[in-house]
Image (cartoon, rainbow, N blue to C red):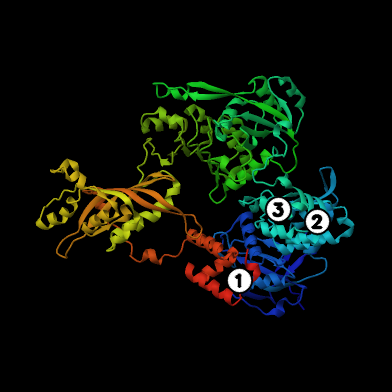
């Protein structure tokens, strides 16, 4: 009799192989129930298949898939084993996870991804028999913990700190995915630690950082235990009320939470006061001083009583602190205050040496008429400030001159500001700011893997840098940051943005960026670069795109051709300069649309079609609410009719009656009366104008200004003055229309993020179309119902999910479920939600 061969065999380093056969398999997909008998026994393996159809590739795709699966089965134990990638399908094995599989079926065997799309799953029951000696999740967890018990760390002079940082990366889990972000998995690990009496008595602290933990409820097993340290940094903990409840019985000398979403709460760390008696320090802050604005300077005593003061009277004493690792304070008296934080730091960075140790001011505060910030591990700089700079800051001022270029080089010292230094103001403690760690996190936040874009625009504004200053205007610090980025991203980065960083030159940067072998675009706009010589070293990178506009160097050139020629002399391979395509002969391509700020894209994309669609309709009255009560409207009509008939004369007279073309007015008094003031007068003019049909596909839109105070949009295109009867012809006209809008109401909508704008000034000019406009006019058509029939876009869906979550407090996967069932109709989805609430069909675990 022939022996049946398995379809697949999985081999493991320290365990028996696992044979998979699909002969007796029961497969389920796109359903919400299954035969419960198939999972009743625990001595069989099951397989979960993810049908992604090639949407994901690489390690990141696997991580996103597993994250979506764990979000779906949240609260239930699941250990994916032998995960295998495929061109169109991924698969892994599981065992003894009935509750998790039930949740997958509750969601119709599909998972929701971060872009709000769905991926279908298959579950194949009984693909293999479990044999003693095969891989076991709990055995692997125990094996990893036993190894870590032998190498516990020493912190603050205390041994026995069990380090589970990035626990899923340990070698024991090569064929096993361990997700501490899953409550049941974290609970299993905590129980294994707590119940091992022999080992647990030696444990004095836990490090659980970088594990994607969302809830610390499993830590309640340690109630009554007093740890030296409990490190939960860089996880996904959100709720202050839940962490206060879950840690109510857990005690430690020091608790670390930095890098969790909870730290972004406006009430953090004050929101942790319910558990402050359980800890002595929280993120390095003494619990009695819990405050978002805390720095190591904070103390009940006067700052001048702490530290060793260095001033001109004892400047040689600076040498006593050469080997100090403590914090030192720079204290700058400014009783006014005359200078802002940014000004005083700019002047300070001009003062320090660019050749000595990098300097990173931390924990800035202004108190009692003094600017104060902390420094450490920069003794050579401090000695330079004392011995060479004599603890003085020179405040520069650009000299006025008749030469328009001289202001770039002529600087006068306007004022001298004196300061003193307090050495050893506070000891450094673990958990306080580490510059390289802050930079690394900031780089991670600003890298977009989908677009291969590292966006360091206004780097200081990155979340996590609130209490440290990373001065990219220093070539040395800029080089260090880019070196860290290059080593981190290697060849994966294609575009680098460095705008709004006060950068003056990029010397030595090209050597660092050579590590990013695929880099072809750099944005250096709106910095302080004075000359092309300061950026010419970047030519070694073979860039295709470079942005320099907004730098002083641009003022050296009188016209665009001269500027392009100068730039291409250094960058011959450039095809795009300042976001505009350059032709081979160095000529800038004419752009159909222009945005002074990319933030204006969504506004223009919403405003323009809505306005003209309404203007072309029979309901122009609905435009009234778009106009400010003091709005001004003027019309200039310069259309010349080739064949003037009585009918044509009557049609264009409606434009001429309201036209304010002063050069053609016989009666100049009409120059005043043809200025239309207020929404009511403007509507009267609109009603007098003939019926129109605009060709929006021919529109050229220039957004000349876009900021928090004003938006200016200019639109060029063509329209038909529609024939009043079937015996007449439509007249094609060209127009330019400029709108000036201002915000009139803010904090509107469910999320209080919406802003209402109104038009305060509008100019409409009508003239004859060009030959090219006549050729392209109304060449393509859209059906009237097209806009209404379009399915909601991904960005629309993301916005709806956020709003639904705000209203209902549901987890995103449940929000998506209600919205999807209601075909993304927000009102219907809310009614569906209320119906489920009334019927008590929503479990508690569905809520945040």
Measured Cα–Cα span from mark 1 to mark 2: 33 Å
* Residue with the mark numbered 1: 107
Residue at point 76% right, 36% down?
427
Residue furthest left as drawn: 646
Q: Earlier in the sequence, mark 1 or mark 2?
A: 1
Instruction: Give the quarter of the image for residue 487.
Output: top right
The residue where tag 3 is placed is 273
Are discs 1 and 2 less than 8 Å apart at CB? no
Mark 1–mark 3 CB contact (< 8 Å)? no
Q: Quadrant of the N terminus?
A: bottom right
Q: Position of residue 288 (x, y in %)?
A: 73, 46
Compare residues 502 and 132 and report the one nearer the observer: 502
- Could you tell me how far apart the alpha carbons at marks 2 and 3 are, in whole angstroms? 36 Å
Choose top left, top right, bottom left or bottom right for residue 302. Answer: top right
Can you identify the residue that label 2 sits on?
Answer: 144
Label 2 secondary element: helix
Report the residue at 38% width, 30% height from top: 562
Pick the residue in front: 398 or 151: 398
Quadrant of image for the C terminus:
bottom right
Q: Position of residue 680 (x, y in %)?
A: 27, 56
């Amino acid at each position: 009799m022939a022996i049946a061969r398995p379809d697949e065999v999985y081999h493991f380093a320290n365990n028996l192989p696992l044979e998979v056969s699909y002969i007796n398999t029961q497969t389920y997909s796109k359903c919400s129930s299954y035969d419960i008998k198939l999972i009743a026994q625990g001595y069989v393996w099951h397989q979960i298949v993810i049908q992604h159809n090639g949407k994901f590739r690489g390690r990141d795709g696997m991580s996103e898939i597993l994250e979506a699966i764990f979000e779906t089965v949240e609260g239930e134990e699941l250990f994916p084993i032998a995960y295998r990638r495929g061109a169109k399908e991924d698969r892994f094995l599981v065992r003894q996870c009935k509750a998790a599989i039930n949740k997958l079926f509750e969601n119709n065997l599909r998972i929701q991804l971060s872009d709000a799309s769905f991926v279908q799953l298959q579950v194949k029951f009984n693909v293999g028999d479990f044999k003693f000696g095969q891989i076991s999740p709990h055995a692997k967890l125990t094996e990893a913990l036993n190894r870590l018990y032998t190498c516990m760390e020493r912190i603050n002079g205390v041994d026995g700190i069990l380090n589970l940082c990035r626990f899923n990366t340990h070698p024991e889990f090569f064929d096993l995915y361990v997700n501490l972000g899953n409550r049941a998995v974290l609970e299993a690990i905590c129980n294994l630690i707590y119940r091992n009496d022999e080992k647990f008595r030696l444990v004095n602290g836990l490090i659980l950082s970088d594990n994607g933990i969302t809830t610390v409820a499993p830590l309640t097993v340690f109630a009554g235990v007093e740890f030296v340290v409990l490190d939960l940094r860089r996880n996904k903990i959100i709720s202050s009320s839940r962490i206060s409840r879950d840690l109510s019985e857990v005690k430690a000398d020091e608790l670390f939470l930095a890098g969790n979403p909870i730290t972004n709460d406006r009430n953090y760390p004050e929101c942790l006061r319910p558990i402050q008696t359980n800890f002595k320090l929280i993120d390095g802050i003494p619990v009695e001083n819990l405050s978002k604005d805390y720095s190591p300077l904070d103390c009940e005593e006067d700052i001048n009583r702490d530290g060793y003061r260095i001033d001109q009277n004892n400047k040689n004493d600076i040498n006593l602190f050469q080997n100090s690792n403590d914090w030192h304070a720079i204290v700058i008296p400014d009783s006014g205050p005359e200078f802002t934080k940014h000004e005083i730091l700019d002047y300070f960075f001009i003062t320090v040496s660019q050749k000595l140790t990098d300097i990173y001011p931390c924990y800035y505060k202004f108190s009692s008429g003094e600017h104060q910030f902390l420094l450490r591990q920069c003794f050579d700089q401090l000695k330079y400030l004392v011995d060479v700079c004599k603890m003085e800051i020179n405040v520069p001022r650009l000299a006025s001159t008749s030469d328009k270029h001289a202001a770039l080089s002529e600087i006068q010292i306007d004022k001298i500001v004196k300061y003193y230094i307090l050495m050893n103001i506070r000891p450094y403690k673990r958990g306080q700011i580490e510059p390289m760690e802050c930079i690394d996190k900031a780089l991670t936040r600003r890298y977009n893997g989908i677009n291969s874009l590292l966006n360091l625009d206004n780097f200081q504004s990155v979340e996590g840098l609130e209490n440290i200053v990373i001065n990219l205007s220093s070539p040395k610090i800029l080089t260090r940051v880019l070196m860290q980025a290059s080593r981190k991203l290697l060849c994966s980065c294609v575009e680098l943005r460095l705008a709004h960083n006060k950068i003056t030159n990029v010397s030595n940067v090209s050597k660092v960026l050579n590590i990013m072998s695929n880099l072809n675009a750099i944005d250096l706009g709106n910095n302080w670069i004075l000359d092309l010589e300061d950026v010419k070293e970047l030519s070694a990178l073979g860039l295709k795109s470079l942005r320099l506009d907004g730098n002083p160097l641009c003022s050296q050139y009188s016209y665009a051709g001269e500027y392009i020629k100068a730039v291409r002399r250094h960058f011959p391979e450039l095809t795009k300069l300042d976001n505009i395509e350059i032709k081979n002969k160095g000529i800038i391509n004419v752009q159909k649309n222009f945005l002074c700020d990319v933030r204006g894209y969504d506004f223009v994309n919403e405003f323009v079609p809505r306005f003209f669609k309404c203007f072309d309709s029979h309901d122009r009255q609905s435009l009234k609410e778009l106009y400010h009560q003091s709005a001004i409207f003027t019309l200039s009509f310069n259309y010349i009719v080739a064949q003037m008939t009585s009918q044509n004369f009557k049609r264009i007279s409606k434009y001429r009656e309201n036209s304010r073309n002063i050069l053609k007015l016989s009666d100049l008094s009409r120059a005043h009366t043809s200025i239309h003031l207020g929404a009511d007068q403007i509507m009267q003019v609109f009603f007098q104008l003939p019926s129109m049909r605009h060709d929006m596909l021919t529109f050229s839109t220039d957004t000349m200004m876009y900021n928090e105070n004003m938006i200016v949009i200019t639109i060029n295109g063509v329209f038909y003055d529609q024939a009043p009867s079937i015996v007449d012809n439509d007249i094609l006209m060209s127009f330019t229309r400029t709108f000036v809008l201002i915000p009139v109401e803010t904090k509107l909508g469910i999320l209080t993020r919406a802003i209402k704008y109104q038009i305060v000034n509008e100019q409409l000019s009508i003239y004859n179309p060009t030959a090219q406009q006549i050729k392209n006019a109304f060449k393509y058509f859209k059906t009237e119902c097209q806009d209404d029939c379009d399915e909601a876009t991904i960005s629309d869906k993301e916005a709806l999910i956020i709003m639904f979550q705000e209203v209902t407090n549901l987890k995103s996967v449940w929000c998506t479920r209600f919205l999807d069932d209601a075909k993304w109709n927000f009102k219907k989805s809310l009614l569906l939600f209320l119906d489920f609430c009334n019927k008590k069909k929503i479990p508690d675990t569905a809520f945040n």
